[in-house]
Amino acid sequence: MGVVRFFGQRLARLAVSLVAVSIITFGLLQLAPGNFADIQRVTSGATSIAGTGTESMLAETQARYGDDTPVVQQYLTFMKGVVTWDMGPSYRYAGRAVEDIIAAAFPVSATLAVLAVLLALLIAVPAGVFAAMRQNSKADHATMFGVTLGHALPNYLIAAFLILIFTAFLGWFPSSGWERPEHVFLPVVALALGPAAVLARYVRSSMLETLREEYVTAAMAKGGPYRTVVVRHALRNSLIPLVTVVGPLLAALMTGTVFVEALFRIPGLGYYAATAAASRDMPLLMGTVLFFALIIMVVNLLVDLTYGILDPRIRAEGGWTSSRLRKVSTQQV
Amino acid sequence: MDVIAAAEGLHSTGLEPDAGAAGAGAAGAGAAGAGETVARARARGPWRKAWDRFKRNRLALISLVMCGVLVVVAFAAPWIAPHHYADTDYEALLAGAGADGHLLGTDQLGRDILSRTLYGLRTALIVAFGAELLALLCALVVGLAAGYRGGRAEQGLMAFTDVMYAFPSYLFAIVMVAVLGRSIFALIVAIGIAGWVTQARLVRAQVLSIKQREYVEAARAMGASGPTIAVRYILPNAIGPMLVTTSFAIPAAIAAEAGLGLLGLGVQPPTPSWGGMISEGTRYLLSAPHMLLAPACVFALALLAFTWFGDGVRDAFDPRGDRR
Amino acid sequence: MTMTQAPSGSSSGTPGGPLLRVRDLHTEFRSEDGAALRAVDGVSFDVEPGRALAIVGESGSGKSVSMRSVLRLLPRTGRVTAGEVWFGGQDLLRLPERQMRRIRGRDIGMVFQNAMEAMNPTLTLERQLTEHLLWHGVCTKSEARERAVRALGDVGIPEPERRIRVYPFQLSGGMRQRAMIAMAIVTRPALLIADEPTTAVDVTIQRQILDLLAGLKDQGTGIIMVTHDLGVARYFCDDSVVMYAGRVVERAPTRELLSRPRHPYAAGLLGSSVELGSRDRPLHPIPGNPPDLASRPRGCPFHPRCDRAVLPRCQDEQELIQIGGARAVACWSGGRP
């Protein structure tokens, strides 16, 4: 299958999935008592001071999703807003349009996620290689125990312990906010440790597999020092498949930011999605959920493409079949 | 067979992967008998073997005991807890650990942290077990139907799972809670529905592989009806792998409950949830770190116990696979 | 144990003694449940410079493991438990790893069964042919490249200047195999261990590879040829050692072994060989399978499959018995039917 056709198919599937997600979300939200506008009228007064000064906004919402508008019409209106990047006002945040909130929040979440992936790689690759080189040693067991912890504990719990240690007891880092550079440290570490555990385990097993390859023995038979052989012959070959894990991990991290952002009160996408859900700000919730889904799907698509480019064998065969790629990438998540 | 093996071994261009002792294993595998004995060995053998392996795994046994203790404590929380979770003690606001009558201190409303942590465990386990039970039921019904009958049930499941894969499960749970409101029931449904499709696919795959085995074909040849085969032959074999995935899903569900609580989407206050307690704890971090420490520690303990228990179950059913 | 007589008499006359002298080598593997499996059980042999020794046996007979024990390249679970490996006046088994490393690749080269697996798919031939020259400090980088090109030419690869820049998977199977030999000989080692170098290639290429190795032998390189194929042994090996279940069961000059095998197992091997069996009589495959390492029969490991077995004599340990000049056989009958 050609690259273009592959890409086209994937794009089409992405669009279909997005529409499906939007229908599910919208449909579910219709099940909630009251419609968009009604809910807002009830809750906006109760949850925030937004109620008073935003009569015009309510009117606008009323026009968009009013009582007399049929459900399908409401959905289409909303989707039109998504496509034209004009989703109307948020209720929870008076005076701010949904698209503006998303535009402001996305870079924050993306920064968090990308930094966390980088940190995770920085921790995981050396740890995994180290553990593999000393398989079954105490150092290996200790690394693997750390991996179990990182794997079992969700990022907000790790964050809680980090806050206890670094804020409450040591007083080194602030526990909330997103203005100064020192605000970045704890949330990024909290986000990175879980993925680092997943990656380290992956690097270790991939490395162990590569170390069993005959060409590693052959390099040793040529008199290579163990470390040189590991770095030159094994490391590179065992890291190529890592690309497939990093993508889904980045996607998982994006959703994981929801909790870390809530805990550290960081104004990212997840934070707004959560507050939107809690205060039933339906347009904002729809907008953030769709945007999240879009990012995750795009990341997965990019990963599949990257993998095809990186592996010369896939390139040579022209084997850009999605089933094969899916098989590869689902194995590791 | 031996003749062929020997001849191959010596053929001048034959491939010979020289790796330790080969041969003997291959000969043994071919000798396995057919028919009913195999079927019975497969139906009962795995359980006993799994239990034997589980018993030998010390970490798994310890975590099994810990999980048992946690379940008992959660069940008995009303009798064990020194206070009711909503009782306020205005004499002791934000009291530290070891304060009079409050072993682990109190929160900003003077509520006993120990009691709230214990009740939080109760909330977490009710939601987690409820959600997984729901997920398991859905998965078994739909997965069996899809795997055994194929056709529309199968197509529907596959299409639905494809969509759900595109929908991050946390976001889905968030939307569900936004729709259903904040209650234990809402949490069970939200977390259960977010998780069942993966399991349903697993059941389907399991069914498809078992369906091909000889003893099922034999039963069908002897005229057993579809549902009979599904319940008598396929279900018992699918239960093992299901148990593995479910025991992995339990700690995930516990974490999901706390996560939603953290976002302010958990159970309605004042019912305690670990997530809510952690969220409150960060607010009084400097004056009362015990508010964060106590629930975080018990939470971590519970997660590790259930995770290690899940690891043990997996290793017991699938000793070689996935150890990494 | 089996190490009784030194086999050096077989090819005496070479001044300075044998190039490699292996004595009573024992190697064990630890299985998953912790049991020790004896893969090599008291193996001894010599290799003279300018001569080739064939180590013949079925898969699992311990021949490859013996070679990896000599180079101390066993997998993590394997361990040499006893024995001596004398090379260049040193016992390799007692050498510090750092010095051992200097011998690997520089003084002892190794050729593997399958170049597809033994060459790194992501490095060019140049990298793989020169890196050990640099590790051992044999020459400078530009000289190393020159030597690598020359080595490629020596093994009969056309246009070596161009080919040195390609990746292994861009070569044909036969060329890849020759490139791997070039990789082993670019340092001009005194001893070359070839582990089934012709098994993975087809017959025409097999011939070229063997001729190439024979040429090296003529230039004075000592060669150990690990093979399950008596035809290969006949083609250019001066001496042969037959291994079964981790032990040497017969040692003889190749020609004598092929014309008159003494050990029942060696006779069986010959009788079941398509190429070498006499044409008048049908093939006689050896009945049964080689023993599992975990459940080795008592005494002679071959006796359960042996058509000449006499109990209980065969349940005693069978030492290698010298039978005339250069021959030895591990059978109480001395191999006389």
Image (spheres, coloured by chain):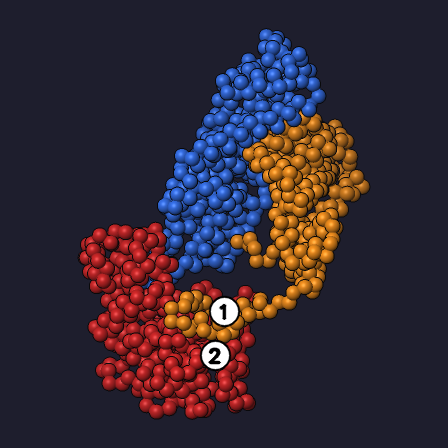
Q: Secondary structure at mark 2?
A: loop
Quarter of the view holding residue A286: top right
Q: How many marks?
A: 2
Q: Is residue C42 above or below residue A272?
A: below
Residue at image location 48% in from the left, 58% down from the top = A135
Q: Residue at x 67, y 31 (%)?
A: B266
Chain C, colour shown: red
For badge 2, the amino acid type reads Ile
Identify the subunit bearing mark 1. Answer: B
Residue linked to disc 2: C286
Q: Position of residue C239 (x, y in %)?
A: 32, 80
On screen, residue B311 above or below A11: below
Q: Mark 1 belongs to which amino acid?
A: Ala
Question: Which one of the lettered chains is coloured orange?
Answer: B
* Image location of residue A179, percent across then percent down: 48, 25
Residue at left offset 48%, top offset 22%:
A103
Q: Secondary structure at mark 1?
A: loop
For the colour blue, the matching chain is: A
Of A155 and C216, nearer the camera is C216
Q: Is C87 located above or below residue B231 in the figure?
A: below
Instruction: Say which of marks 1 and 2 sits in front.
Output: 2
Left or right of residue C182, residue A203 in this image:
right
Give the camera-side residue of A107 and B99.
A107
- Residue at mark 1: B22
The x, y position of residue A5, in whole percent, is 42, 35
